[in-house]
Image (cartoon, helix red, strand yellow):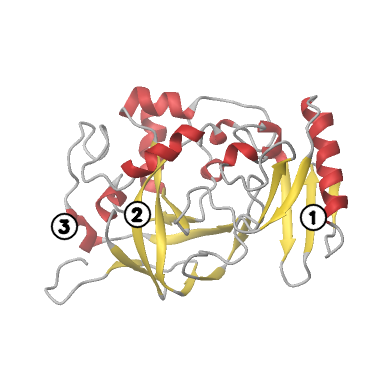
Amino acid sequence: MHESSIGWRCRLIAPHCPKGIGNGSGGKVSFSLVKELMAKVSQITRFPAKGLSGEELQETPVWEGVGIPGDRALAFRFADAPQEAVDKRHFLQWANTPASARLRCRFDRATDHLTIYDGEMILVDGMGPGDAARVSAAMSAWYRTTTGQSRDLILCRARYPDVPDCDLSILHLASLRDVESRLGRPIEPHRLRMNLHLEGDDPPWIERSWVGRRLRLGSALIEVMGMLPRCPAPDADPETGVRTGHLVRDLMAHYGHSYVGILARVRSRGHISLGDALTAVEDESGLPS
């Protein structure tokens, strides 16, 4: 997401669909659809390091203000960026370094053990309290060799969500299939780097009707904050680290917007497992809350 996308955050909860969502001509999606959800969780992914590959999970707790524990808990900030930087352009990620898409990242939170692979090559193996400098040096060497740029990377430990104040990113595969049909090419879901994939017989773009609503997912209560505008990150091929395609350009051409997926906050912590259903939460009047 470019720096300009910070301004898009106000559009995430716009009351009308962006042009092309739902029926292809804009307008509202009926909120009555909220009560007829068919979606179930088909994939759960935690991304240990911002901008690197994810780890698929069978189940996970989700917490308020955190989402999946350990998600984007690490990041590699460019050494010439401000120390307090939070904008993603200041960090190693697929959008500014397509080659990073081919890196495989594993992080054991219990043992504080980080491993990063580039193909069969191990770039980083192990990280303890005194290992941050060694990890930073190894990733800096990889970056300089791979890109030809003389910039260093610094390992940071905090929480680095792509969009502040949102805990979970969610992709309904029905909408992605609609995008594939419009664009005339397949799009691997993992390129979109979402925490949760949903599968079901819902109509494409039904998730637009969830914006501003609270929903039960597993035993957790979530609130959908808005649609997610895409950046160039999905153009990077995770197998080769080469940019292929122009998703944002193609979305704008076919839909008039760049949204795919939704963002949510956890309002009441709980547990999510594969196969859990998404259900509407009703208020005392019997209407979706």
Residue 62 vs 196, above or below: the answer is below
Residue 241 vs 136, above or below: the answer is above
How far apart in space, not on screen, are marks 3 and 1 (Cα)?
Answer: 46 Å
Residue 163 vs 248, above or below: the answer is below
Q: Quadrant of residue 26?
A: top left
Task: Residue at 58%, 67% (x, y): give it.
Answer: 69
Label 3 element class: helix
Give the residue type at disc 2.
Met
Within 10 Å of disc 3 (Cα), the crowding (few <14, some 14-19, many 20+) is few
Q: Which residue is mark 2?
A: 225
Mark nearest the camera among 3 and 1 is 1
Q: Quadrant of residue 37?
A: bottom left
How far apart in space, not on screen, are marks 2 and 1 (Cα)?
Answer: 33 Å
Task: Residue at 36%, 22% (x, y): give it.
Answer: 253
User: Nearer the N terminus, badge 2 or badge 3?
Assistant: 3
Within 10 Å of disc 2 (Cα), the crowding (few <14, some 14-19, many 20+) is many
Mark nearest the camera among 2 and 1 is 2
Residue 44: image x %, image y %?
A: 53, 60
How far apart in space, not on screen, are marks 2 and 3 (Cα)?
Answer: 18 Å
Q: Which residue is mark 1?
A: 115
Asked whether the viewer can see residue 121, the reply is no
Tell whether 184 sits left or right of 114.
Answer: left
User: Nearer the N terminus, badge 3 or badge 1?
Assistant: 3
Marks 2 & 1, CB-CB < 8 Å contact = no
Q: Nearer the viewer, residue 213 or 78?
A: 78
Q: Which residue is mark 3?
A: 32
Residue 34 vs 229, above or below: the answer is below
Label 1 element class: strand
Number of numbered discs visible in the structure rendering: 3
